[in-house]
Image: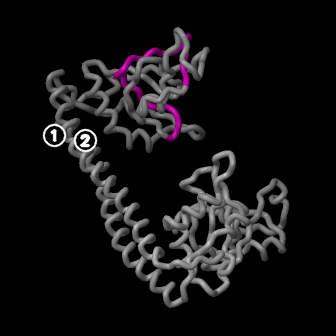
Amino acid sequence: MQLIEFGSIMNMAKGKKPVNQSPEKRDGFLPYVDIKAFETNTVDNYTDGVKCLPCEEGDILIVCDGSRSGLVGKAINGYVGSTLAKITADGMTQNYLYYFLQGKYALLNTKKKGTGTPHLNPDLLKKQMLIVPSIPEQKRIVTHIEELFSELDKAVETLRTTKQQLAVYRQAVYSSVYSGIAELKPITDFFEITGGLTKNSKRSELPIKMPYLRVANVYYNRLDLSEIKNIGVTESEVERTLLEKNDLLFVEGNGSKSQIGRVAIWDGSIEQCLHQNHIIKGRPLGNMLPEYALFYLISGGGRNQITDIAKSTSGLYTLSTNKVKNLQIPVCNITKQQQVINEIASRLSICESIEQTVDTALAQADAMRQSILKQAFEGGF
């Protein structure tokens, strides 16, 4: 056996945009197979196949256009989507080809071509070298790959279960600490609740431009400041919406029960930073430690309050400054508040250490998967 260029045996046909398409299955119509269809078996559209490229269950498809170019999947019976291509190779079984292409995803995805929508570079794929053994040997290699992947999958499932258990543990930590504090008082006794800047087209004309926080910057007890945008404001708006270190930040809403009321503390890392109206600000009045309030608001009791007041008649979830003002916080003196913070922080630090170990192991599992494929197609099996 010798190394050959993949292009010498490769056959690739691009999918077509259907002439006739329907979101519902009709007589004579088959699934229009896009990325979602081959990844999850979920079909959003059907077509009668006029001017389309047919595919059968198990055919190998590769993404040709978009951010996921180079991704490989297996088809269901239907017609190939316009951003995909059906790919075969002379002398290679479908599964052998499938795993060969899986091992090239990182290369193909990072070396796409085109300045607008990225595209798969077929020339790069054609130049890949490989060994094409006999069919029995291909089947043996595939079996070995799948055995190793099965063991990896079991390990990954255990790691993911551990992450879920850690999330449950976090809530148990919060609940155990706050459950012994019976008295509740309005959040407005401890924080001044105010709204932010409303975006509009006229803001670009205003002379003062300043950085501001958006929903995309605020998560549960975490800020993502990797992308900060500027906005035009008036002097009076600056005074009203300027953030100060230790301000509470509430996400106003996006309709989702799990994401409504995400809350974090502003760390002051960007000077002269404002916030838009979809972020509600809680300015400390000096009689409650912000972290004490934060930990309660992301605990089970706090989350229940937030979702109860946020639910609308339409079934969606959204907050407002008035709704946030209706929240209540367990009350204790400052000394006790600091003890609560210390206890939670201590117990969560152990949790975070375990989670970092789990995340590292998950990343190593992905690297191991690629290592198995590399070894398989370089004669290591």
**Residue 23 is inside the magenta segment:** no
Upstream in the sequence, badge 1 or badge 2?
2
The residue lying at 48 percent from left, 18 percent from top is 79
Q: List the residue tagged with mark 1.
A: 380
Given the image, on which type of amino acid does mark 2 rest?
A: Lys
| Residue situated furthest bottom in the rendering | 335
What percent of the width, then of the height, locates residue 351? 35, 69
How many residues crowd mark 2 within 10 Å: few (<14), some (14–19), many (20+)? some
Name the foreground residue: 379 vs 293: 293
Name the foreground residue: 71 vs 300: 300
Q: Is residue 202 above or below residue 342?
A: above
Disc 2, SS: helix
Q: List the residue tagged with mark 2.
A: 374
The residue lying at 38 percent from left, 78 percent from top is 346
In this picture, which residue range is highlighted in magenta? Answer: 45-67
Mark drawn on residue 256: none
* Residue 218 in view of the camera: no
* Residue 126 in view of the camera: yes
Q: Decide: marks 1, 2 in contact (CB < 8 A)?
A: yes
